[in-house]
Structures are given as structure tokens and as C-alpha cells.
Amino acid sequence: MCGICGEITFDGSPASPHITERMTDCLVPRGPDSGGMLNRGRVSFGHRRLKIIDLSDKAEQPMVDSELGLSIAFNGCIYNYPELREELQGMGYRFFSHGDTEVILKAYHAWGLDFVQRFNGMFAFAIHERDTGRVILGRDRFGIKPLYVAEKGKRLFFASSLPAIVATGEVDTTIDPVALQFYMSFHAVVPAPYTMLKGVRKLPPATLRVIEKDGTSKDIQFWKLNYGGSAEDAERPFEEWRDMVLDELRRAVKRRMVADVPVGVLLSGGVDSSVIVGLLAEQGQKGLKTFSIGFEEANGEKGDEFVYSDLIAERFETDHTRMMIPSADMLEALPATIRAQSEPMVSYDNVGFYLLSREVAKHVKVVQSGQGADEVFAGYHWYPKLTNSNDPVEDYANAFFDRSNTVMRQHVAPHWHADRDEVRAFVENHFAMPGADDPVDKALRLDANVMLVDDPVKRVDNMTMAWGLEARVPFLDYELAELAARIPSRHHLAHGGKGVLKEASRKVIPNEVIDRPKGYFPVPALKYIQGPTLDMVRDSLTSQKARERGLFNQDYLDRLFADPTSAITPLRGSELWQVALLEMWLQQHDL
């Protein structure tokens, strides 16, 4: 797990090592153990390393294989690298290191652009071919690892974080009106290739970008998740799906234990993280380190779920740490939390993951986490509403959109309006794509391929990597996800949602955890903005920078200030927090 960056030029001029160094310096939190740079004429790579696999200097990056004429900067983990290494050795390849980075280089040489099909893992990488000058950028199937890009004239920059690219001083930092519309309407989800800044884009998940020496490029989508199985799948009994899912989940959890350092678990007390703990215990893990966090209650809403996480910790005899965060500490950590975000992310639990990661990183370097289960196994409340829907786009929009385009145009100042309703058109186009006929499947596909990437997954990556902590997400094992996509929606929606996963989990964890009301990572002080939190929010939105930027209509802000708890989105978010978070993010990054 690391941070990568670099520059490529296309006019014969050398890449600037000074610019690569600036980007690399921004990535130190992602890779606090060591760093390196490779400057080769028109190509410059930077790398920061978090030592997880092959702790020796032989695995330092950027890695060069002079015999093959290949160099790489890589972020992530290929869980099946031992099997691939053995296969490549059988083909005659010799290895000088013992980790997964070199396996990627040899695999590319052996299998060309098809190499990525063989990887089970999370990854973002840049590979340079010495003899052709070609550069290959790649990102994993679910975009678990980020990769931002920017082009200026005959130069291209890439990095693991948006602020690292901004640090080049070479990109347009103007707000993108289309991205702003997504942020305001699509629950702060800004899908690839957009970012909040016009000059910075992100490589889509499951994509290879092949960049030739002259600057021409092509994108190759190497994987997609199709929904709706065969006729045999449609008739397969529920119990068979349950057992198949449990077997595949066992494999996914076991794969993510590959490491040369201890692996812990972020234990929220929900089904998803609890079953990970149960499966690891089943596989013989002793003294497993688990971690939970809670916050002070506000407005009568409880801020922790310790009763459930404690139950799991006791049942499976884990080495458990729980942390209660006072509201004052949460407020103090908010600026740093926002600064750690590559893009503005509105979810309240960002600060929870940030503070949790700070403490967990004192104990372990790697954790497994339960993100992705709701999107893969249909755990959200809007999926049942789409059953047999005659207008799935409208029904999805009513449940998920924070505001319609018409309302958004009343909230956002005219200068920042996009030309059309981009969000609605995006959902319509996505729902119309082949590969998902059932309305529930259409929503699951959109959420798994778009919302998941640019909300839960990005949130966990940003917050954990702010403290040099690697988070692995077994529910996003692509083979598990492919199996789940074949399950008929009626089975997914059984038992109030996540039916198949819940029944599989009963074979591993106590019923009390499975049959509890669905929980979220609660941070009540950010949902019910009052007192010092309200003061901070008001200060940011009335600052000179905010007034000069003029993102929001003043009458809208005045209404929010007058009654902060009155404007709650369909997904239970605070409109005031949403607009304030964007302004605070811009200010924290000096934009």
C-alpha cells in the first residue's frame, strides 16, 4: 500500500524531477516507511512506500527490471501474487524480490495487456516500457485504489491524490460546474472522469490507459459487472445461493490475510464487519486485533454501537480496542479530516474513520473492513422500492438524489450552473445500458460501479491512508461480486434486504447482530449542527474566500443558518453540512 505519482512529456522535453518530488512529498502519509523517484528523460515516477509485503529493500519502488526494460510505480496489493509468481517461474522468469510489485512487471511482460485479468486485488499503477516509451496506467475493478490525472499541453501528471496533482502548480483549479451539480444532487458522488476541479480528472475503475510516446492514448475497460444470471440461476434455491456466497466469502477473507505484518479488523458491530471477524476466527486466527469507535449522542441520537461490537469481540475472543470520541475532539479533528480528503466527501463518518485510523495505525498496518456489502448484496432501503418499478429512474432519483436539478439551481449561484441536468441524464444512460434488466439490478449495478467507488470506498481509502493504514475490503472481491450479481433480486431483498448474506452469516455469527436494526456509523454532532459546530460552519460559509467564490445563493444560506436541522436530505444528510463541507474542503486545500 503506497502512494504513486509522476509526469510524462510528449514534446521531447524532460520531465521535471522537482515537480515529481513535490507530488511525492504530498503522498508521505500514504507511504511513511520510505520513498523513491525514477527520472528517465521524458518520464518521471515518484513513490511512497508502506511496507506490507516483502519488507526488504529489494521491493523498493519505483521498481526497475532492466532485463525486461520495464519500470513500475504501484499502489495496492495483489492477493493472488504467490500463485502468479509460481506460474511465472514455471515459464522461466527469475525474481529478485519476494513481493507483488515484481509479479506485476513479469505478468505484463508475459501476458501483455491481458495481464490485469489475472489479478485479484486492489491496485493503481504506472508501467513504463523503456524501448517504446509507452506508459500504461491502470486501476482495479472497483476503483479501490485512486488514480488522478491531469494534462497540460504536452505534459501529463498522475498521482494517488488530487492534492498531489494540485501541488504541481500546473493545473486549472477552477470549479467544474458539472462536478458541482453531481456533488449537490447525487449525494456528493462525483463519478469518473470528473473531479471538483476542471483541470484534474480520474481514471475510471477497471480501466487501462495506454499512452504512446507521442501522447496519443486509448482506454481499455478490462472488466464489467453484469447482472441477471442464467435460467439455471433463476431457479436455483435460496439455500444454495446462501452456501455459495458463504464459501466465496470465506475465500475472499482468507485472501486478504496475505501480508508480512499482522492484519486487524475494523469492527463496527454490523453484520458485514462481524462476519469477517467470525470467518477469520473460523480459519484459526488467534488474538485478532479488532477496533471500534463511538461518539457522544446528540439530539437524543446514540453515537455508538458498542453493544454489538463488544458481543462479537467477546464471542470470538479478539484483542479488542474501543474508542469513545468526545464531541470536542471530533470538532478539533475536522480540519485535518477534510484536508485528508482528495475530494469533498459529505458523509458524517469521515471523521470517524479518520480518528479510528489514527488509533488503529498505532497497533497494526493492515485491516479488513466491511465496505461494499450493502452495494453488492442489496442492503439499502431504496432497493425494495424499485421492485417491479415502471419508472426505475424516477423511483431511484426520489430515494437517492439530495435535490432535483430545479431545486439545485435555486441553491447554487447562477454562475455555477451546468448547461443541463447532467445527473439525471447520467442515471438514465446507466440504467439503459445492457447487462441488467431487473430495476433492482439496474440500481445495484449503478451503486456498485459508481456510488460505491466515489463514496464508501474512497472514504475508507482517504481516511486510512492519512495515517499509513491499509484497508482491505473482502466484499469487493471481484469473484464474490460476480457471484452476487447472478443472484435474483427477490433473494437479495429477502429478510428486509441482504437476505442471502444475512442467512449465510447466521452460520458464523450470533443472530442478535443479524436481526438488529440496520445501523450506520453515527456522528450525531454533524447531523444536528449546533453550538461550536454551527459556529465553525457559519464562519467558513461567511468568510471572505466564500463570499468571493459565491457558490451558493445568500437567501438559501440564511435559511440554513436560521434552522440548521430543518433541511435534511432523503438520505438523512444535513444540507448545511453538505454546502459547508465543500467550502471548507476548498479552503483547506487553498483553492
Image (spheres, rainbow, N blue to C red):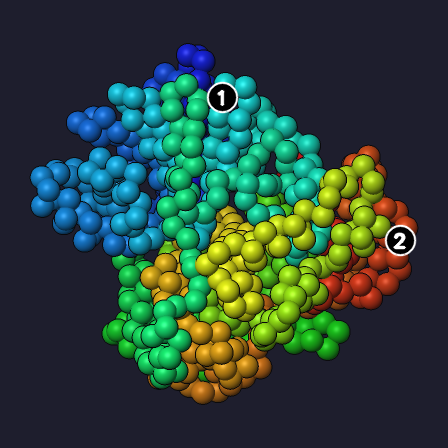
Q: Look at discs 2 and 1 and give the one toward the viewer.
A: 1
Residue behind mark 1: 155
Instruction: Count neighbours of disc 1 (C-alpha within 10 A) and say few if under 14, some if 14 to 19, many if 20 or more.
Output: some
Name the amino acid, label 2: Asp
Secondary element at tag 2: helix
Q: Identify whether 525 is placed above or below 160.
A: below
On the image, the x and y values in percent for residue 434 come to: 48, 56
Q: Residue at x 64, y 33 (%)?
A: 198
Q: Residue at x 62, y 65 (%)?
A: 392
Q: Nearer the viewer, residue 75 or 336?
A: 75
Q: Residue at x 20, y 52 (%)?
A: 82
Instruction: Count neighbours of disc 2 (C-alpha within 10 A) and say few if under 14, some if 14 to 19, many if 20 or more.
Output: few
Secondary element at tag 1: strand
Residue at the top extreme of this rendering:
12
Relative to residue 61, is residue 67 drawn left or right? Answer: left
Residue behind mark 2: 558
Q: Nearer the viewer, residue 484 or 330?
A: 484
On the image, the x and y values in percent for residue 56 come to: 24, 42
Quadrant of the frame with the C terminus: top right
